[in-house]
Amino acid sequence: MRDYYTITELTREFGISTRTLRFYEDEGLIHPVRRGRTRLFRPADRLLVKQILRGKRLGFSIAEIREIIQMYKAPPGEVGQLRTIINKAAEKREELRQKRKDIEDTLAELEQVEEACLGRLAELRVAS
Amino acid sequence: MRDYYTITELTREFGISTRTLRFYEDEGLIHPVRRGRTRLFRPADRLLVKQILRGKRLGFSIAEIREIIQMYKAPPGEVGQLRTIINKAAEKREELRQKRKDIEDTLAELEQVEEACLGRLAELRVAS
DNA sequence: CAGATATTTGACTTTTACGTAAGGGCGCAT
DNA sequence: ATGCGCCCTTACGTAAAAGTCAAATATCTG
């Protein structure tokens, strides 16, 4: 486990640009430390980037990803705040379950596509 | 099963705008028939809209959705084409499985968030 | 310490997926 | 005949998420 990663190391690891990482910083999603002006990414920052990209793959906007990330680092807080977080988490989970169902449905359809293609291929072989 | 739906009926059913449906037509995703200039959506068009919106929820771009849709209505075709489709379908399925894993991971993290919040709430009750 | 390589900020541009406004047509209930 | 609701096209506008480029530093390496 490295102490620090440079910006270019992370861009190579994740296949993104430096612009993207700076953009995420501007958006308040990550907070790499600085040595002079140069950004240094700690393992925790790297993990955050991973979570951000995961959110992107699922079609979440930056704003939504920010919300999710903020839930992760929620402080002890007071009762009202805790309840708010619990509710938000429940909402997101519901949304994720919907997405999962969408995935299952699409997977099923694509399997049908494959079967149909294989079937058609078999027909063509017989006919020739 | 209705013969035709008007554009407004579909916007109400799916919570989208007429602009969106016209945009999808411009993009070649749907092809409602016309009575004069007015679009008439058949059940098959309605199903397509459903599939498009499902794709959107999963973070697919219009271009990607177009690809998926084209697999569904792939014609009997010739051997090379069929193989291409089979490969594309396999790729998409892999992508979907990745997304599903992303969802599972995020769900697990959110459950941890909830547990942590509930734990903290319990602490606060004891302390008071 | 020089030269190469990496990083910074800032500004402008691009792409995607629509939103929105303008201007007009059709059918029908008042 | 007119007001209402729904429909059409054309065209410009916009927000999000970066891409791209320039010019100025920083950092590493021999």
Image (cartoon, coloured by chain):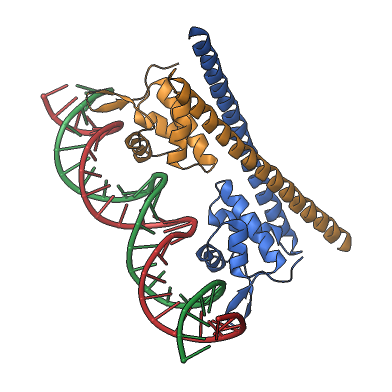
Chain colours: A orange, B blue, C red, D green
Q: Is residue A51 above or below residue B18?
A: above
Give the residue drawn at x 49%, y 23%. Answer: A82
At which x and y percent is residue B95? Answer: 61, 42
At which x and y percent is residue B53? Answer: 60, 54
Q: In this orientation, does residue B72 appear?
A: yes
Give the residue drawn at x 63%, y 78%. Answer: B34
At which x and y percent is residue A99? Answer: 62, 42
The image quadrant where one finds the N terminus of chain B is bottom right
Give the residue drawn at x 48%, y 8%. Answer: B127
At which x and y percent is residue B87? Answer: 68, 49
* Residue placed most toward the observer, D2 or D12: D2
Q: In this orientation, does residue B70 appear?
A: no
Q: Is residue B73 above or below residue A4?
A: below
* Residue placed most toward the observer, A65 or A110: A65
* Residue placed most toward the observer, C16 or C7: C16
Left/right of residue A36 with respect to residue A82 in the rendered view: left
Give the residue drawn at x 71%, y 65%. Answer: B44
* Residue placed most toward the observer, B5 or B74: B5
